[in-house]
Structure formats: structure tokens, C-alpha cells
Image: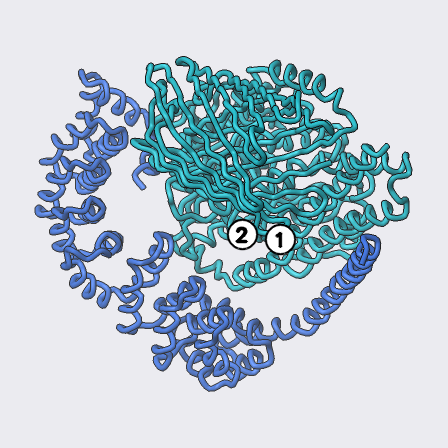
Amino acid sequence: MNARSFLIVVAIVQGGLLAALLVLIVLNRWFRLRRSTRLNPLREAVDASMRRWAAGTAPLAGVMVGLGRMPTSLAIDAIVKWSARVPGERWRQLALALEHTWWARLVRANSTSARWWKRLETARFLSVAATPQDAARLTKLINDPHPAVHVAAVACLERMENTSLTLTALDRLPQLAPTVQAYYAAMLLRSRPVVIDHLQKRLRGVDDPALPRLAEFAARLAEPALRERLTALAAHTDPEVRIQSARGLGSFPHRESVAALKNLVTDDAWAVRAQAVRSLGMIADVSTLPLVQAALQDNVWWVRLRAALALMRFAAPGRKALLEAEVGSDAFARATAQMVLGLPAQALAEFAT
Amino acid sequence: MSTLTTLVGTTDLAILIYFLVLNSFYAVLLILSIPEIWEQTRLAEDEDFQRLMQSDALPPITILVPAYNESATIEASVTALLTLEYRNYEVVVVNDGSKDDTMEQLRHAFDLYEIPRVYPETIPTKPLRALYRSRSRSRLLVLDKENGGKADSLNAAINASRFPLVIAVDADTLIEPDALLRLTRPFLLGREIAAVGGTVRVANNCTVKDGRVTDARVPGKILPGIQVVEYLRAFLFGRLGWNRLGGNLIISGAFGLFRKEYVLEIGGYRTTSIVEDLDLVVRLHRYLRAKKITYDMPFIPDPVAWTEVPESMKVLSRQRERWHRGLISAIWQYKTMLFNPRYGRVGFLAMPFYAFGEMLAPVVELVGYLITGLGLAFGLVNVSFALLFVLVAWGYGMLLSIWAVVLEEVSFRRYRRLGDLFRLLLFAALENFGYRQCTVWWRLKAFAKVGRGGHVWGDMARKGFGKASVAALLALWLARPCLGQSLRVSAWSSYEAVDNSQDWSTLGAQLTLTTARGHGGWLAAEMLGRFGETDVTERVGGVVHPTQRLWLTAEAGTSRQPTFSPKNTWETDASALIAPRVSTGVGYRRWNYAVGPVDIWMPHITTETSKMSWTMRVFVSRNPSHRTDGAVSLRVTRALSRRTTVSLLGAGGRESYLVGAVVRSLRTATGAAGIRYNAARGMTLRLDATVIHSSPILSRTGVAIGVERGL
């Protein structure tokens, strides 16, 4: 084949591809139009029957019929959308009724599919319509390697109280990236007793590599039952654990917490000192005022800022300390005090978050 | 005429190969974009935004808005930014010393009040005049600073930002309400994100209400219309394809999210850069790869920001020229990343693609047009063949554009009207006729501007090109008597991994003219990367062959930035055939380093058998420390077949090297193996591997490739 023949073949192939793409565009438009013409009335019918059922003016059967007529993915979309609008007890009726429908059985069966999008569909469905019989499936889905699947599956904990599922999610929590972890934490809040019980055990393992993440989660819960464990962690060798301990202890105005924070405020790691100062501000125990005042002279800007903001929470004594610092001899303390005293209440509130 | 025929033929062949390689790569991107868009669409459809909005899991974000003379639109833009669907974010607007009343507009619209500065200046910027908060919008922070450009404003905004993620948006960019939620999807998928890019679409002709695009339309005017197709192609298939290859080099400055921690580590945006977003992304890649940090820089197609594109040729030409200057600048600035294994796929795929596929594309296209024109004028190129070639090239471009339209149609379908679809297809077809040639011209102008010594070239430009011009004149003088004789072009590149030091790299090319009697001259240039610095050396040399048995060679070289290489080098050699198949000679080399000269004497002997050749060289060098070093090397070359030759080299002894500010004597043992393949049409390919044990420092292993072509 010479160069000319080659180019002719390429030109013909290109022409064919161009034509195919144009046909594809037209077919896609036509298909979508047809689909939306067919599905829009069904979607509206399901919405109407859901509305009536949620208000108690129509039986559940109408909803089931409507859902059964829709393609599975759209039915799941409708269920997820309405799950936030229907009260819990009523929603449980729907979940139980869905257990026996053919399409829901099919969706459940997809929990072991090799294709992640099928498993994602199942996870989304079970996140709002799971029954106690789905625990094993959900456990598998929470342990799924695809992030979208396990993130969708863990949302089931918002509606289900199941110790084994909670523990599965808790075990996975430390291995996750911070954002996913925060999402898991939000989902786990409903199962508080189980979580706290489990955390109390896990927080004892001082060599546990997951400890920093577990401590972070414990701090987020602000649960008095965990105060003792968080206080013990204040002496941990890992600065990341101490940071979480310092953060968590701010929620507990207890003398042991204050004692631990007093130690942490002189920690070698500046991030620990900053957290400890912030927590002392939250507790606002007057006995710690000199320590917070001393932190105004810290050599790290963030610690000084946190100290100044903490002093503002001590009300009059704190403000007085800042005013003294503003005219004091230490340049660092003077600048920070000047800066924070100039902030309006709104900005102070924003900085406190 | 024969030279012209060869020139046209060779250039045509080179362009054809370039065209095939580049378009094959585009085809790969096109294929890779299919699963990528499918996955992204799937994830976007299944995302539960309601739940996400209620959860406080999503990371807080700071939106950075640099504004310069944006008085007319600033209120609407900032209002739209303040009403995005996201739980935890703040907006930092920077008035970059606007000459209009942008600051007044902001003050009035958002009831601003001055506050003291409450953050450290992590990245140095132009002085800040004042800092404001809003009484009506607690998320808003406004910085008023002296004019320093967009990059400087972004740096000031980064300094003031409180949150770990920052998004840079232009003040005239309209962000869709759920764009932030969508943009944070990779975080929720647990990926180690360094930056995320969203789609930028063309807002011209769209209906905009309260800072939101409510009805997306394709402009009827040809210039913005073609840009809609260009944007679709760049975002929906170019960047999606790169997602799978792991080397996204462009996160749009008009809408890109970055992890602040990394941006701060690399010192923020570079204020001297022409295209600050590209520069930032390349530096991020370089930093993260060097630090061996696991990271991802994906592009997500469904978060959308809308921007107005130029509607006049004048503005568009300025924009494209600036973009291309930025690309040239970035490629030049970070050339050490090219083919550098340390930077993985970025070094081996993304950088070479942007250097050879994007940066050089207009040059190749221009050469193609010129050569074709020349060929047609002299009857060297068949007219119908040339037309067929142009048709195929344009057809391919059209195919790529229509593919982008298909991706848009099957995924997000923002343009719902049939009329818009028709316009998209029309503009995809029209793009190749006129518009494309204009962009080639604008991009070529960027080269010209850079060549004239814009600040793009940094230190290199200030050094001037005087020496190169002398070398070029000398080469021309040498070349004159050799016209019509044989001409060889060779190029080589090597990479050496050096123990406890930055790796070394070399890129060189040589032009050799030889007469039928064996006289010749050459001109060579080499770009050297050593110890993290770059130098360019030029050499010019010649060989004369006064009798059948004698060769006299001389060569001189200079260096542009002699920090690690000699300021200049001089070399002569006299060799004679003393017996059948035995030649011997002596060479002398003088390397004038900044710290003093190194003199090297090199007696050598070569003997040949029918299939093998043995060369032994002795090196006796005297360095500025008045130390005499000696080394010996033996090279054995054997022909494996008619086309293939292999060689082995062993050497040992002491050699003088400039290390830091002194010439040191290093104990070295060298092993090298190479293979040469003589392909058809006078083409020779070579591959060499070397292992050098050097004590106490600079042990290294390397590979070199080379290509040589006789014309």
C-alpha cells in the first residue's frame, strides 16, 4: 500500500466515523426525548402518590405500583428523594413493603455484582430502604473497595440501629481520608451508645496506629463518657493524639480536663499548644488565666492568636489581660492583643469556629 | 534542486511522522475520555446532594476573587458567589488597586467595615491598604491592596484565607450554585487531592439572571461560537483523557480548587509568570513528585463555571498569544522535568506532550504549509496528494471537535435546543477553515515575542545570543566549500542517575558536513543539566585529511553559563595510519574552567580485525590543583550483522572533575555497552548504557539514545 492509498483509506474511515457520530447525536437526542416523554408522567405519578401516602390520604399500594412501573434507577432516585420527607415510622412501612417487590429483590441481589455501579445502586437503595435482614449485605457494602459504594452504604446508619454495622463502619473509619471520616462520623452519631462503648475500648490501645483518628472522632462526639479516656491520651507520645485530646477536652469543664490542658499548654508541639489554649478558652476556668496570658508570648503566631481569642472568652478578666498585654513590654503579645481587641463580635465568633 | 527535493522530502516525512504520533496520542485521549466521562456522569447522577448539604463532612473552602477594574460586574459576581449551595465557605475578594470605583461598589453593596489585619503574610505581596468585613454578609472578606497583578492578588487572598482548600475564580466568572458541592466529590471518594479542576464554559449569548446562567445558548457569532467547541474539546475530552493518564497539567485559573497547604509550600502563584495557573500546576507536580507525596489532580466535568470569551479578533489574538507565551515559558522554565523519570507520567507523558504536541504544533504546522507551498511551486509534491493530506488532517481535527460535541450530548447536555446543536456542529466543521490558521499565527507570534526577549526566558534571555551567532557564522563559512557534499544531522540525549546528587541530563545535536575527500566540519550544541542547573555549550570543529594516512582534527567550544562546565574548550588531534588496520595518534584537550585550566593529553591506538575493532586511549591530565591524573580506556566494537554493531568499553583510573568550586581528582571505573543500528535511508540509531563508579562522589548510571541521518 502506498502513501496515497493509505491516506484514501484514512479519509474514508474518517468520513465513516463522522457520519456515525452524527447519527449517534441524532439517535441520542431522539432516544432521550422518547424516554423523557415516557418517563415524566410516571415520575409525576410516583411523586403524587408519595405525597398522598406521606400525608396519610392514600394507601401504600399506589406508591408501590408507581415505583414498579419505573426503571430501577429512577425508582431508587425517587425513594432517596422522598426518604428525607417522610417520617421514620411511615418510611419503615415502605421499606418493609419493598422487600417483597421483584425489582427491589433484583437490586438487593446486585450487592455482589462485579460492576461497581450496580453495587452503588444497591448501596443507595439500602441506605434508605434497608431492613434488619439486609445487615449482611450492608456489611459487605460498607467494606466495599469502591469509595462511592461504601460512602453510599454507610448512610444506612442514619436510619438503622445495628451494632454489627456500626462496628464495621467504626473499624473502617481510621483508614479513611479526613473528609470521608467526617462523613462516617456524621452517620455514626445516631448509634451513639454502641459507638461510645466501642471507642472506650479502642482508645485504651495506646499502640493502636488508628488512635489519632479514633481520638479525633471521640473529640468530635464531645461525649462526657469519653472524657476520662481523652484525658489519659493527653500524655500520649504521638503529638497528633495529643492534639485531638486537647481539642476534645475543651468540651469538658472538669478539673481533670483542666489539669491535663495545663500540661498540654506547654507541649513541645505548637499545634498541641494552640489547641490546648483554645480549649482552655472554651472552659474559661479563671485559674488557667495566667497560662493563657503567657501563651500570648508564644513564638508561634497561631498559638498567640488562639491565646488572644481564648482570653476574650474569659470575659472581663481576659479582656483586662489583653489590655495589659496591649501596653506591655512583649512585642508579640502587644501586636496580638491589639489585633484581637480590634475585632468586632461577629469576627470573633467566626474565628472561634 | 536535489538538495531542495531532499529537504522537501525529509521535512514532509518528519511532518507526517509528527502528525501520526500526535494524532495517535489524541486518539488515545479520545478513547480514554469515554470510560472517564461515563464514570463521572454515573457518579454525578448518583450523588446525594441533599444529604451532603446537611452533613458537615465537606471540607471548608475559601473562594479567592481577584478584581481589577470590575466596577460594572463586581456586585453581581460577589452576590452570586455568596449564595452558592455549600455549607462552609468564605469569599475573599481582592481589589488589586483598581483605577475605577470597584472598591466603592463593594463598600456600598456589602456594607463593609475596616478590620485590623489578623493573619501572617505567608507569601510576600504588594502592600495591603486595608482589610474589610461585611456587616450584611459574614462570609465575605475584602482586601484592598496596591496593584500587583492577578497572581499577586491571589497570593494576598491565600494569605488571608482561613480554610484548607482554595478556589481561584475570576471576578467575571459565573459559578453554578452546586459547583462547589460537585467539585468536592473526589474528597468524599477519599482521594489524595492536590488540586481539582472544573469545566469552564462560554457564557456569551447565554441568559444570565442574578449572576446565574439560566439558559445556555451557543452564540450565533462565529468567533465565540468556535470557542464554545474549543472549550468543549479542551475540557470534555482533552482533560478527561488526561485524568486516566494521571498528568493533568492545566487546572483552569478561572475555576480550579487547590489544597492550600501545597500551594503555600511552593510559595503561591509566581507573579512573574505569564499564565499563572499553568505555572502553579507544573510547580505543584514538581514539588509533590520530588517529595514523593501521593496525590491526584483530577478534572471533574460536572462542576461548571461560565465565562465570557473574546468576540473580537484583536482581543482573542492577544489572549491566545499570551496563553502560548505562558506555555513556552512554563516548558522552558521546567524543562528539566522533560523525560525525567523522577516526575513519572508527568515527566514522560504530559510535559513532552505539551512541549512537542502543543508548544511546537504551530511551528510544525507553519513548516508544513511552507514546505507544501514550496513543493507545489517547484513541482516536487503531487497536488492531489497534498490536497488529500490536508483533507485528512482537517478531517481529523473536525472529528475530534465533533467527538467533544458527542461527549457533551451524551453526558451533560447543557445546550438543549436543536438550533444550538446545529450551531455546534457547524462551528466544529468551520473551525479548520481560517480560525485554526489564525490561532497558528497568534501562537507563532508568541514565539517571536519570546525570541525578542520578553521576561519569559528569565536569566537566559539577559545573557544574549552573541556567541551563538558567531558560531553560526563560522559554521556557514565552513559549510560553503562543502556544499553539494554529504551532510549528516545527529541528535542525542542522555540521562544519568547520580548518587547523592540531582540527576544529569543531556540533549544535543550536531550538523556535520563532509567532502568526498574526507575533509569536514561540524557544529554542535548541547544542553546540559547538572546539579539542578542548566547550561548550553556549543562546539565547532573540523577535520582535514592532508594525505591518505593522516588526519588532523581541531575543535573549539564555549559555554553560556559555565558554573559546572568549562568556559571554553580546545581540542586537537593528530592521527596516522602506521600499518594496515593500525592507526595511532595523540590528542590534546584544554578545558578552561572558571577556577583554572585542565590539560589532558590523550595518546591512542586503534587496531581492526575483520569484524572487530579495538581502541585504547590513555588520559593524562593536569588539573588546577597541580595534580596529575591518569586513566586508561579500552573500547571493543564488533559488527553483529550488516546493520548492527555493538561496543563495550572499560576504563579506569583517576579523572579531573569540576565539583562545586574546585577541580577534584576522582577515582573512576567505567563500564559501558552500546548498540548501533544502521536503518534504511542513512539513518543510524544508537543506544548506550553506562555504569560509572566514582570515588568519593559522582557515581552514576545512565542511558543515552541517539539518532543520525545522512542527507
Q: Compare marks 1 and 2 and give the one earlier in the sequence.
A: 1
Q: As displayed, is residue A249 above or below residue B134?
A: below
C-beta proximity under 8 Å, tags 1 and 2? yes
Name the kind of residue labelled 1 in the image: Leu
List x then y, in percent, for residue B688.
Answer: 51, 42
- Considering the image in quadrants, where does the C terminus of chain A appear? top left
The tint chain B carries is cyan
The answer to which of B119 and A112 lies nearer the viewer is: A112
| Image quadrant where residue B608 sits | top right
At horizontal 79% and vertical 37% (from top left) the residue drawn is: B6
Q: Which residue is mark 1?
A: B29
Q: CA distance from mark 1 to mark 2?
A: 9 Å
List x then y, in percent, for residue A174.
Answer: 28, 58
Name the kind of residue labelled 2 in the image: Leu
Judging from the image, mark 1 belongs to the subunit labelled B
List x then y, in percent, for residue A189.
Answer: 30, 62
The tint chain A carries is blue
Q: As displayed, is residue B585 above or below residue B392?
A: above
At horizontal 64% and vertical 45% (from top left) the residue drawn is: B678
Secondary structure type for disc 1: helix
The answer to which of B354 and A5 lies nearer the viewer is: A5
The answer to which of B106 and B8 lies nearer the viewer is: B8
| Image quadrant where residue B5 sits | top right
Around disc 2, counting alpha carbons within 10 Å, would you say few (fewer than 14), some (14 to 19), or many (20 or more)?
Answer: some
Is the image coloured rainbow, by chain, by secondary structure, or in one colour? by chain
Q: Which residue is mark 2?
A: B245
User: Is residue B104 among the parts visible in the rendering?
Assistant: no
The answer to which of B608 and B177 lies nearer the viewer is: B608
- Considering the image in quadrants, where does the N terminus of chain A appear? bottom right
At horizontal 81% and vertical 35% (from top left) the residue drawn is: B371
Secondary structure type for disc 2: helix
Q: How many marks?
A: 2
